[in-house]
């Protein structure tokens, strides 16, 4: 601003000086004119005066025009300077003195524009050595025409900030233009980026799973981590630069070539199982998670290899255990059924199918409660009916709540129990009869009590009906001496029964047990209203 005012003042002084010279010239011309008028009557002096006046007027107009043009260009240049935002723009002379700057210096460093003009650059810039900086900058300017460097900006309040400096030369004027850019955010972002890169590098190198980066075009391995070295039993230098196909058994090259192409075509992460071959020739099963990403400008396929040797060994053991369990359960004589929460049979062994005639997946018609036992009808040997005992306990099947139902054939146990009870009841009645025989009671009472005791045996009589016949005077005739719940009609017709007649007479004559489950031809004695009966 000072330089512009000085220039304007110089122009005004020149114009005033010019008019002063013009005034002196005019007076001199008038003196000459008086001289010529006295000696010769000619128009030369007046013409010369007019020419000089016109020349001076034109010169003044040209000077004014150029001054206006210079003012306009200077205003445009200043507007350009001020529009360079948010960067600071400085114009320096050959001595490093600031001659022009834009208003960004106020916003960035806190200085007013007038304070900066005329200031030396080292007052607002801090470098390790300002002389060395300018020496390097001039060398670069002479060779390349520009120089890019960095320095620390000094704010008016004493604060410091990182700046990037772009310097350009002004040719013969030996000056320079400087563009100062605040790179605080860039520095902060770069620091964050370095921190993230370090964290990523640590995570990459220390990952539990092996990680391989392969060039998507060439298939060459570009990087790997420590876990990859352990997995392949190789050093990183032995892995990087090799084709990704060398990771796998050579006899499966075609299969893994197709897998690599499939991974490239997949837009999302891709999971697969594969095998790798170690330096010692050992084959290891791995689970691969592959994805395609950009590292810099390169398209990289990243493969995360997890060693699943232990998992495969466990799966094999579980599979063998399941097979053994299945074999044991299938060969078990006890029926075993797994029911889900809906009552559907998820598993039924061979014995259960045989005992319960199960053919479909639904458990038919039984309500089972955990912790309780129930007796059910079963089929034995595919033909005869038997008795089974069913129990249920809560369990899990494939991670879901279920019931484990067992069915056991207890037919023989039931038969043994019933036989034992039958023998006990019979022995108890015999003991009672023996005790009764020792009592002094009339024969009719003795016979009736004996009949009641006999009919009290549950397995022997379905109905409490019966009678006792004795042989009296006639050795060929049975006489009814005691009865219980016998119809009156039968009592009358069967009071005396000759040997060989009807059912009871035949038993007496043959002295063998007779059995009939209905009224057959052996029932010779009939009467009106007789009901179906057995003997």
Image (cartoon, grey):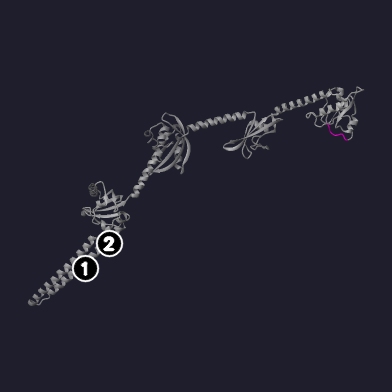
Q: Quick one: label 1, few (<14), some, or many (20+) residues within 10 Å?
A: few
Element on which disc 2 rests: helix
Residue 140: percent from left, percent from top? 24, 48
For the C terminus, the quadrant is: top right
Which circle's residue, 2 or 1, is located before the other in the chain? 1
Q: Nearer the viewer, residue 326 or 204?
A: 204
Residue ID for mark 1: 61
- Whether tag 2 and tag 1 are in contact, CB under 8 A, the answer is no
- Give the residue at the far front of this rendering: 440
Q: Is residue 221 visible?
A: no
Q: Quadrant of residue 42?
A: bottom left
Magenta stretch, residue numbers: 529-533
Numbered-mark total:
2
- State the image quarter where residue 37 is shown: bottom left
Confirm whether residue 45 shows in the render: yes
What numbered label is drawn on residue 75?
2
Q: Please give left or right for residue 212 compared with residue 529 in the image.
A: left
Q: Quadrant of the N terminus?
A: bottom left
Task: Check the image and report above or below for 408 versus 39.
Answer: above
Nearest-to-viewer mark from 2 and 1: 2
């Amino acid at each position: 601003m000072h330089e512009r005012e000085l220039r304007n003042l110089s122009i005004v002084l020149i114009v005033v000086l010019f008019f002063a010279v013009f005034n002196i010239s005019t007076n001199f011309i008038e003196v000459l004119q008086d001289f010529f008028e006295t000696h010769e009557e000619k128009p030369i002096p007046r013409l010369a005066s007019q020419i000089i006046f016109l020349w001076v007027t034109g010169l003044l107009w040209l000077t004014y025009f150029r001054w206006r043009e210079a003012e306009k260009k200077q205003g445009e240049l200043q507007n350009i300077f001020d529009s360079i935002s948010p960067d600071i723009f400085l114009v320096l002379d050959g001595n490093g003195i600031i001659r022009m700057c834009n208003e960004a210096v106020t916003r960035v460093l806190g200085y007013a524009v007038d304070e900066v003009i005329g200031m030396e650059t080292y007052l607002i810039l801090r470098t390790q050595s300002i002389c060395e900086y300018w020496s390097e900058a001039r060398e670069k300017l002479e060779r390349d025409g520009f120089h890019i460097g960095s320095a620390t900006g000094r704010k008016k309040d004493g604060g410091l900030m990182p700046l990037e400096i772009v310097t350009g030369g002004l040719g013969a004027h030996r000056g320079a233009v400087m563009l100062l850019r605040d790179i605080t955010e860039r520095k902060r972002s770069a620091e964050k980026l370095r921190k993230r890169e370090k964290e990523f590098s640590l995570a990459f190198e220390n990952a539990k799973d092996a990680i391989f980066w392969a060039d998507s075009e060439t298939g060459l391995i570009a990087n790997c981590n420590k876990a990859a070295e352990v997995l392949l039993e190789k050093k990183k230098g032995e892995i990087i630069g090799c084709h990704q196909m060398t990771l796998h058994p050579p006899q499966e090259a075609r299969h893994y070539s197709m897998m690599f192409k499939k991974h490239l075509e997949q837009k999302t992460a891709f999971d697969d199982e594969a095998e790798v071959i170690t330096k010692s020739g050992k084959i290891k099963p791995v689970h691969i998670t592959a994805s395609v990403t950009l590292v810099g400008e390169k398209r990289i396929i990243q493969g995360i290899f997890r060693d699943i040797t232990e998992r495969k060994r466990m799966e094999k053991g579980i599979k063998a255990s399941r097979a053994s369990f299945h074999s044991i359960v299938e060969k078990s004589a006890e029926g075993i059924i797994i029911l889900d929460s809906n009552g559907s049979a998820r598993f039924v062994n061979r014995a259960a199918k045989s005992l319960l005639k199960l053919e479909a997946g639904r458990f038919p018609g039984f309500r089972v409660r955990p912790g309780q036992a129930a007796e059910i009808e079963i089929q034995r040997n595919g033909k005869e009916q038997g008795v089974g005992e069913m129990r249920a306990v809560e369990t899990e099947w494939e991670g879901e709540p279920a019931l484990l139902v067992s069915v056991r054939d207890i037919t023989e146990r039931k038969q043994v129990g019933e036989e034992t009870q039958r023998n006990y009841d019979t022995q108890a009645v015999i003991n009672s009869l023996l005790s009764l025989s020792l009592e002094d009671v009339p024969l009719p009472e003795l016979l009736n009590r004996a009949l009641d005791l006999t009919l009290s045996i549950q397995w022997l009589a379905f109905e409490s009906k019966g009678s006792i016949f004795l042989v009296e005077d006639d050795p060929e005739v049975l006489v009814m001496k005691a009865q219980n719940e016998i119809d009156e009609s039968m009592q009358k017709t069967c009071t005396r029964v000759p040997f060989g007649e009807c059912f009871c007479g035949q038993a007496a004559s043959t002295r063998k047990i007779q059995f009939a489950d209905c009224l057959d031809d052996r029932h010779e004695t009939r009467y009106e209203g007789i009901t179906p009966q057995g003997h």
